[in-house]
Image (spheres, rainbow, N blue to C red):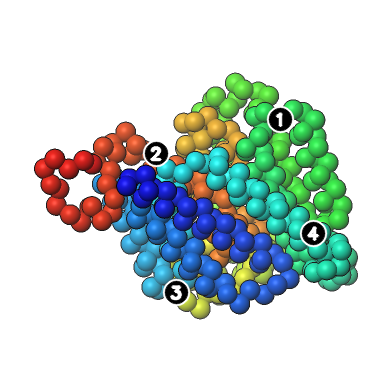
């Protein structure tokens, strides 16, 4: 019976992952999905089934309850359900094989992206290129390969390659890294997407440096520096939310960033002075600055919780000497200064949720002798019960 319960939960979890990934691919295409809300609810329900069929210790339950109160309050105040769905996904990740999950995510995302590109190139569905004024002083033709915007295509390339590096990087040869650089250069030739191109090169450089200098990634100072860089990206975003382009420094810098802070500062509630503990329901505007969107959409408390989750991953990368995870977390943070890809209603745009899902319960493993199903938590223990 125990095995059947576990199997049911795992099957539901993998179906939920597939559903969330398909939602991401559909969003990147030219198709407008009228069943999006139903898809999200179905994936959420499946994650809940996985949670109900998983054993949790008392400590784990207390942590779930504490975070659950925060995300439910967030939902009740701003009516955005992403935080609740994200918590369900993270909690449901307990006892899931991390590498298997990431490989499935990589396979489906890669297959979906290639399919969209081929359909556009064959003229069946989706545009190959877009000719427009992208805010860079003139009309340009840039290639999007079925994803609606050139930045969207290069962004997906960044996310896919980051997974490839994490899963296979330690076994890759120099020629493989060189091939990735060439792919990135080729994509940049067509998309002219500066942000994804630069950040992907930074991630590659960081991982190559740490891999071939093993004494570096064994040192605590490397992980401290990574955490410092992460905090700087967040604080810089907060500063941008406070002043916009109102200083000479920010004005000049924002010109290089193609108006990331200028366009977010247009919306009054996105300005630091108007941030709230939990965001207002009318905060629905889209702009590219990721961290500002995080606090604008969800509020200070959920935003700080997400930031804390990222720092926790950096801490775990130090414990496991996982330099690939360190570089990816910091790289995603730098990317979020200029793009809001990770802050989205589509949960599996943000692979960090899977890493958080794997690591959140690690501190409780040595104290999990009292692990029980959630419904058993409500029952009085019976002498002789098997926990």
| Element at label 2 | helix
Picture residue at 65% right of the left edge, 23% below the top: 213
Give the left or right position of residue 134, taking residue 168 as reference.
Answer: right
C-alpha gap between disc 2 and disc 3: 31 Å
Q: Do the residues labelled 4 and 1 touch (CB within 8 Å)?
A: no
Q: Do the residues labelled 2 and 1 touch (CB within 8 Å)?
A: no
Q: Considering only vertical position in the picture, is 38 above or below 111?
A: below
Q: Considering only vertical position in the picture, is 207 above or below 252?
A: above
Q: Nearer the viewer, residue 351 or 301?
A: 351
Give the left or right position of residue 125, taking residue 224 as reference.
Answer: right
Q: Nearer the viewer, residue 179 or 141?
A: 179
Residue 117: assigned label: 4
Q: Where is residue 300 in the image (x, y as percent from the top left)?
A: 44, 62
Q: Are marks 4 and 2 in contact (CB under 8 Å)?
A: no
Residue 88, quarter of the rendered image: bottom left
Label 2, on which residue? 362
How many residues crowd mark 2 within 10 Å: few (<14), some (14–19), many (20+)? few
C-alpha gap between disc 2 and disc 1: 28 Å
Residue 172: assigned label: 1
| Element at label 4 | helix
Q: Where is residue 39 in the image (x, y as percent from the top left)?
A: 54, 68
- The mark that comes first in sequence, 4 or 1, is 4
- The mark that comes first in sequence, 2 or 1, is 1
Label 3, on which residue? 79
Q: Position of residue 121 (x, y in %)?
A: 86, 62
C-alpha gap between disc 3 and disc 1: 45 Å
How many residues crowd mark 3 within 10 Å: few (<14), some (14–19), many (20+)? some
Give the left or right position of residue 328, taking residue 77 as reference.
Answer: right
Residue 117 visible somewhere in the drawing: yes
Picture residue at 81% right of the left edge, 44% below the top: 183
Q: Considering only vertical position in the picture, is 267 above or below 368?
A: below
């Amino acid at each position: 019976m125990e095995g059947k319960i576990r199997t049911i939960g795992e099957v539901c979890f993998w179906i939920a992952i597939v559903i969330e990934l398909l939602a991401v691919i559909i969003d990147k295409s030219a198709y407008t999905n009228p069943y999006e809300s139903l898809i999200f609810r179905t994936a959420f329900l499946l994650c809940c089934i996985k949670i109900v069929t998983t054993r949790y210790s008392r400590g784990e339950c207390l942590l779930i309850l504490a975070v659950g109160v925060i995300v439910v309050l967030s939902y009740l105040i701003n009516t955005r359900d992403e935080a609740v769905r994200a918590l369900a996904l993270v909690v449901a990740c307990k006892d899931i094989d991390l590498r298997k999950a990431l490989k499935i995510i990589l396979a489906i995302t890669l297959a979906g992206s290639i399919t969209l590109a081929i359909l556009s190139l064959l003229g069946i569905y989706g545009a190959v290129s877009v000719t427009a004024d992208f805010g860079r002083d003139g009309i340009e033709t840039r290639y999007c390969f079925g994803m609606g915007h050139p930045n969207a295509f290069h962004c997906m390339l960044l996310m896919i390659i980051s997974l490839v590096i994490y899963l296979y990087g330690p076994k890759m040869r120099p020629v493989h890294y060189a091939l990735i650089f060439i792919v990135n250069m080729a994509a940049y030739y067509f998309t002219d997407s500066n942000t994804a191109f630069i950040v992907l090169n930074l991630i590659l450089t960081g991982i190559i440096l740490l891999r071939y200098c093993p004494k570096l990634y064994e040192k605590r100072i490397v992980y401290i520096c990574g955490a410092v860089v992460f905090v700087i990206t967040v604080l810089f975003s907060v500063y941008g939310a406070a002043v916009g382009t109102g200083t000479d420094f920010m004005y000049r810098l924002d010109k290089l960033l193609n108006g990331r802070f200028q366009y977010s500062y247009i919306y009054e509630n996105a300005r630091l002075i108007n941030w709230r503990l939990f965001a207002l329901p009318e905060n629905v505007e889209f702009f590219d600055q990721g961290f500002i969107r995080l606090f604008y959409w969800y509020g200070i408390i959920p935003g700080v919780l997400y930031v804390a989750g990222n720092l926790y991953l950096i801490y775990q990368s130090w414990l496991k000497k996982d330099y690939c995870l360190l570089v990816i977390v910091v790289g995603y943070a730098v990317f979020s200064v200029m793009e809001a890809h990770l802050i989205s209603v589509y949960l599996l745009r943000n692979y960090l949720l899977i890493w958080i899902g794997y690591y959140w319960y690690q501190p409780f493993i040595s104290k999990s002798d009292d692990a029980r199903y959630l419904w058993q938590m409500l029952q009085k223990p019976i002498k002789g019960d098997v926990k």
